[in-house]
Amino acid sequence: MTVPILFACLAGVLVGVSRQVNGRLSLSTSPLIASFWNHVVGFVALSILGLSIGGLIPAGAAQAPWHAYIGGSIGVIFVAAGSWLIARIGAVNTALLVIGGQMVSGVALDLMQGVSAGLLASVLGVALILAGMALTQRRR
Amino acid sequence: MTTPSAHRLNPLHLMAAFGTGGLLTLMVHFNGELGRYGNALFSSWAAHGTGTVAALVLLAILYPWRSRSEGAKPRAPLWSYLGGISGAVTVMLTSFTVNSPLALSGTLALGLAGQVIFSIVADRWGLFGLPMRRPDRRDLAAMTLILAGSALIILFGRGEA
C-alpha cells in the first residue's frame, strides 16, 4: 500500500512541477507557445513509452465517438491558462482555485447526469470552497 | 524578490482560475470516455497528439496578434521546454494508482495533497524561476476552507466514481 500512496502523492507534485515549468517557459514565449511545447514533448514521451511496451493503439479506439477526442483541445487551453495564471497569482492560488473550480464543476456535471450520490457532502463541500474563494476577495 | 500577497486577488484572475478548473472537469470527462474505449495510455497519447494540432491551429489563427516585444523577454532555459515529460509521468502514475486499493478517490485526494504541498514550497522559494510569494494568515484560512470542501466532495460527495 505504501507504493500506491507514494505514487499518488508524486503524481500531484508532478502536476505542480509541470505548471511551474510551463509557467517559466510562458514568461519567455507566450502561454499558448508553452502549451504547444508541453503537448509536443508529452506526445513524444508517450509515443516512446507506448512503442516500447506495446498496445499504443488499442482495438476499441476506432469505435470511440468523435467527442471523446476533444479532451486534447480543451487541454491546450487548460495548460495555456495555467501558465498565464501561475506567473500572475502564484502557484498556491492557481492550484487552489483550479481545484475549487474542478470540484464545483464536477458536482454540477454529476447533477446534470442525474448522479445524486452523496449530495449533502457535495453541497457542503461546494459551500466551503465558495467561502474560501470569497475570503481571498475580502479587502483587509 | 518577494511579492506581498496582502492585496486582494484580481477578481478576473480568480474567475479565470475557477473557470480553468471547469475546463479540467470537461477534459477529464472526455479523456476518461476515450480511456474506456481504449486504455489510459492511449487516451493521454491521443489527447497530447490532438492537443498539439489544436495548439498549432490556434497559434496560426493568432499569428497576426503575436507579441512583438521579443527582445525584452529573458531567454527560455532548455529545461523549461520539458514540462510535458512531467505530465506524461503523471499519466503513468495515476493509471497505476486508480487500479490500486486507492481507487479514483484516493488518487485524487493524495494528488491534491501533493499538489498543494509542492505549490507552497514552489511559492516560498520561487522554484523554476518564478517569483517568490509568502502566504499570509488569510491565505492560509482560504486554503483550509478550499481543501476541506474538496476533501468532502472527493471522499464523500461523488460516490464510487
Image (cartoon, rainbow, N blue to C red):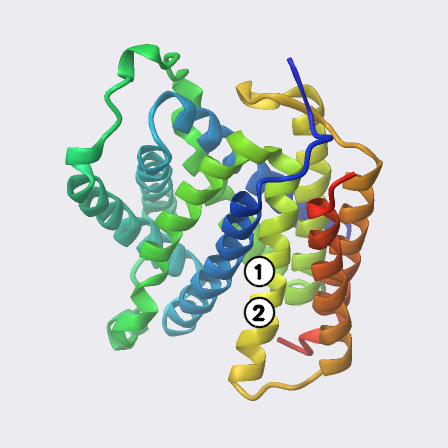
Residue at (23% x, 21% y) in the render: B68
Quarter of the N terminus of chain A within the rendering: bottom right
Tell me if residue A101 comes above or below residue A84 in the rendering: below
- The chain letter for the residue carrying disc 2 is A
Foreground: B98 or A55?
B98
Q: Is residue B53 left or right of residue B138?
A: left
Secondary element type, mark 1: helix
Q: Which residue appears at 42% of the width and 67% of the height?
A: B35
Q: What's the amino acid at mark 2? A: Gly
Crowding near pointer 2: few (<14 within 10 Å), some, many (20+)? many
- Quick one: label 1, few (<14), some, or many (20+) residues within 10 Å? many
- Residue at the (33%, 49%) spot, across then down: B48
The image quarter containing residue B150 is bottom right
Element marked by disc 2: helix
The residue lying furthest to the front in this view is A139
- Chain for disc number 1: A
* Residue B52 spot, x, y in % from top left: 27, 45
> Which quadrant of the view contains residue B41?
bottom left
Q: Are marks 1 and 2 in contact (CB under 8 Å)?
A: yes
Left or right: where B8 falls relative to B14: right
Q: Position of residue A82 (x, y in %)?
A: 48, 42
Q: Disc 1 marks which amino acid?
A: Gln
Picture quadrant of residue A30: top left
In this rendering, do the residues under marks 1 and 2 share a single chain? Answer: yes
Q: Position of residue B60 (x, y in %)?
A: 16, 40
Q: CA distance from mark 1 to mark 2?
A: 6 Å
The residue nearer to you, when weighing A110 against B15, is: B15
Label number found at residue A106: 2
List the residue tagged with mark 1: A102
Q: Is residue B68 found left or right of B115 in the rendered image?
A: left
Q: In the rendered view, tell whether residue B117 sits above or below residue A73.
A: above
Foreground pick, B155 / A32: A32
